[in-house]
Amino acid sequence: MGFAQTNPGLITMNVISRTVYIEYNGSSGTSFVFDYNNKQYFLTAKHVISNLKDNDTVSIFYNDKWNKYKVKLVGHSKSSDISVFSVPEYFDKSDNIIASSNEIIYSQEIYFLGFPYGLTHTIRNVNSKFPVPFVKKGILSNFIIEKDFKVLFLDGINNIGFSGGPIVYQDKQTNKLILCGLISGYRSEIINIKQNNQDVNYQYSVNSGIIFGYGIEEAIKLIQSNPVGTEL
């Protein structure tokens, strides 16, 4: 099994190594390690670390076990499902990634990474004993701008555990991967059970294939308002 370093159209090692599995107060999800102005931050979905406060403890999965870290809270977005914190004891030395949702093209292919259903797999001599995230593919189906943040709608199948994971796409001019947003969740659809072509008194929820996330600019605003990241 191989991993791309710079090959266009493939997920490169810096995106893989910066995607980490986290847990807080019984809730687990995905986080992305992001550098901004020579400081490092962890980006995730707000509902994954709901009610996180400064100096609380977050667990990061490493070397096949949970490791606890005291964190600094950068902030929770008031209007979107994005939160940012920093971990003084940990930082990633891989190349950083450009972050912007402004150049992504309607219907463009995207990738998103994370840890569905808590599935983890550590590959020997790969990713420094951190688990390798799952990667899935979709397209930018639509987007809307609400107040001062952007909601991204993706066509694809999301699963529990991808929340907070990075959404990346390939820039057509440079072939580099760009971080455009974070996964929030997916729209469910209620289906009626039929028997002999007749509805019965039973319904169930299915994944509609519509994923929603938030533009990365909302995370950057949180960082700019409280730049307490770990010095690089």
Image (cartoon, rainbow, N blue to C red):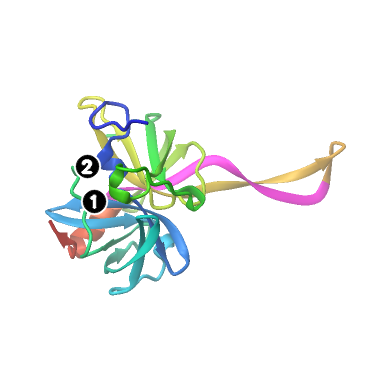
Q: Are marks 1 and 2 in contact (CB under 8 Å)?
A: yes
Tell me the residue at 28%/74% (across/down). 55
Camera sees residue 102: no
Q: Which residue position is annotated with label 2?
A: 97
Instruction: Check residue 141 in the rendering and tell me which mark sits there, or answer none.
Output: none
Task: Please identify the quadrant where the C terminus is shown.
Answer: bottom left
Tell me the residue at 29%/65% (across/down). 75
Q: Amino acid at mark 1?
A: Phe
Q: Residues within 10 Å of mark 1 (few under 14, many from 20)?
A: many
The front one of 176 and 149 is 176
The front one of 157 and 231 is 231
What whole-number distance in Å separates the C-alpha atoms at marks 1 and 2?
8 Å
Left or right of 178 in this view: 163:
right
Indicate the quadrant where residue 136 lies. top left
Q: Which residue position is annotated with label 1?
A: 34
Numbered disc 2: secondary structure: loop
Tell me which segment is drawn in magenta. 200-217
